[in-house]
Image: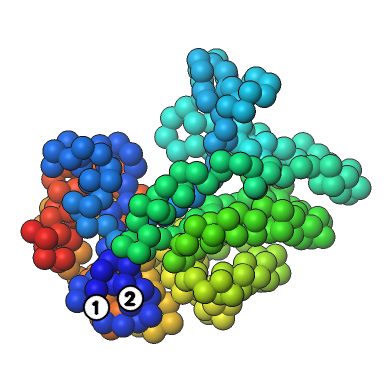
Amino acid sequence: MNKRDRVLAAIQHQATDFVPYNLHAVPTVWQRVCDLYGLKDNHAAAAYVGNHIVKVGSDFNYNPWAAQVGNVQLTLSGGPVQTALDAAGGLHEDEFGCVWDRSGGLPHPVRYPLGAVEGGAALARALEQYRMPDPRRAGRFDQARQLADRYRGDLFLFGKLGMVLFERAWSIRGMQQLFVDMATQPEFVEDLLDRIVHEWNLPIIDQQLALGVDGFYFSDDWGSTTQLMFSAKMWRRFIKPRLALIYDHCHRAGVVVGQHSDGAVSSLFPDLIEIGLHVFNPLSPHVMNPVEMKRQYGDRLCFYGGIDVEHTLPFGTPDDVRAEIRSRAQIMGHGGGYILQSSHTILDDTPLENLAAYIEEVRAMAGLA
C-alpha cells in the first residue's frame, strides 16, 4: 500500500496499516525543517517527513502574473504597470481587483472592486460590467502540472480552489456589505455567486481535473470560533445549492471532494454529507470536539487535521505533541476515516523542539524512525 492508496483507503473508511498524515506549514517553517535535518529543499523535506498529500493549484489572494519591484507591481505579461502597492510595498491587487495589505502578518483586504457601489440598479449595472479574470489564461497551471507529474500515482493529489463561494463574493463586494446584500438584495448575491461558479470555479476545476488529480479541495470559511458567521438558512439559500453543483461536477469526474472551512461549522455537516462531501478539514479542537465528531459523523466523513495549532504546537511540550498525535491516530483513525495533520498551517510560533516532536512521532508511526 503506497501513500496514495493509504489516503484513499482512509477516505473510504477502511482500516490502514497506519494513519496517513501530512505536515502543513508556512515556507519559513519548511526551511527550519530543511535546516534541522540537512535537507536540500521542500521536496526532500516532505519526503523525509513522509507526507501523503500534495495540493496543486494556486493561492487565493494574489495576482500570479505580477512581480513586485520596489514599490510598484509590474505585470509579467508585459502589460501596463499597476499601482496596487503603496510606498511601503504592502498592498497587492489580486486578479479580481481586490486589494490586500500584505505588509505584515496574514493578508487582509482593504479595497473591493464593487465595494463603493450603491445598491439597486447601480449595483446590478456594476456587476454586469464587472469582468472576471480569464480562468484559462495560458500558463496558469504550469507549476501545478509539474507537481502533478512528479507525484502522480505515489502521493494523493488534491486539486485546490480557495475562496470558492462566500469568500470570493465578499472579496469582490466587501464582507459587511455582502451581509447587508444577503438580507436586502438577495438576487444580486445569487447573480454574483452564479458568475463565480460558472465563469471561474468550473473552468478552474476542469483544468485541474485534466492534470489527473485524485480529489479536489475547496476552501471557504463560514464560521467564527463560536458560531456560523451568517444563518444556516442563508447558507442553505446562497451556498449549498452552488456547492452541490460544484461537488457533483467532481463526483461525475470520479474524484474525492474535500472541504476546508474554519470555525464552528459542524451544524452544517448533515447538509455537506447530503451533497456528497467526503473529507472535512481542519477539525480544530478548540471549536469542535474531535471525539464527538468521530462519534457523530466518523462513518460518513473523513476528518483531515486535528493536531492543535492554537495551544499544543505553539505552547505545549514535545511530550504533549507526541501524546496528541498518538491519541488522534488511535481514536480518530479507528476503522479509517482520518488523515492526521495540524488543525491549520503550522506557523513560526511553534518551537523547534515541538516541530521535531511532530516529525519524529509521525515518522515513528510510519516505521521510518
| Quadrant where the image shows the C terminus | bottom left
Instruction: Determine which of the numbered discs, if any, sits on residue 229 in the image.
Output: none
Residue 37 x, y percent position in the rendering:
13, 42
Q: Nearer the viewer, residue 148 or 16?
A: 148
- What is the C-alpha distance between the residues marked 2 and 1? 7 Å
On screen, residue 180 above or below 247: above
For this view, does 197 lie left or right of residue 205? Answer: right
Name the residue furthest left.
Answer: 369
Q: Which residue is mark 2?
A: 10
Instruction: Determine which of the numbered discs, if any, sits on residue 16 in the image.
Output: 1
| Quadrant where the image shows the N terminus | bottom left
Residue 145 x, y percent position in the rendering:
46, 50
Q: Label 1's element?
A: loop
- Residue 202 in view of the camera: yes
Q: Residue at x 60, y 60 (%)?
A: 206
Residue 52 x, y percent position in the rendering:
29, 61
Q: Nearer the viewer, residue 99 or 38?
A: 38
Amino acid marked by disc 2:
Ala
Q: In the figure, residue 27 lies in which quadrant?
A: top left
Crowding at dot 1, Cα within 10 Å, few <14 / some 14-19 / many 20+, comes out as some
Marked residue nearer the N-terminal end (2 or 1): 2
Crowding at dot 2, Cα within 10 Å, few <14 / some 14-19 / many 20+, comes out as many
Q: Residue at x 85, y 47 (%)?
A: 128
Q: Residue at x 32, y 47 (%)?
A: 25
Amino acid marked by disc 1:
Thr
- Residue 310 in view of the camera: no
Q: Nearer the viewer, residue 84 or 74?
A: 74
Q: Nearer the viewer, residue 183 or 349?
A: 349
Looking at the image, do the residues carrying marks 2 and 1 touch, with CB atoms under 8 Å apart?
Answer: yes
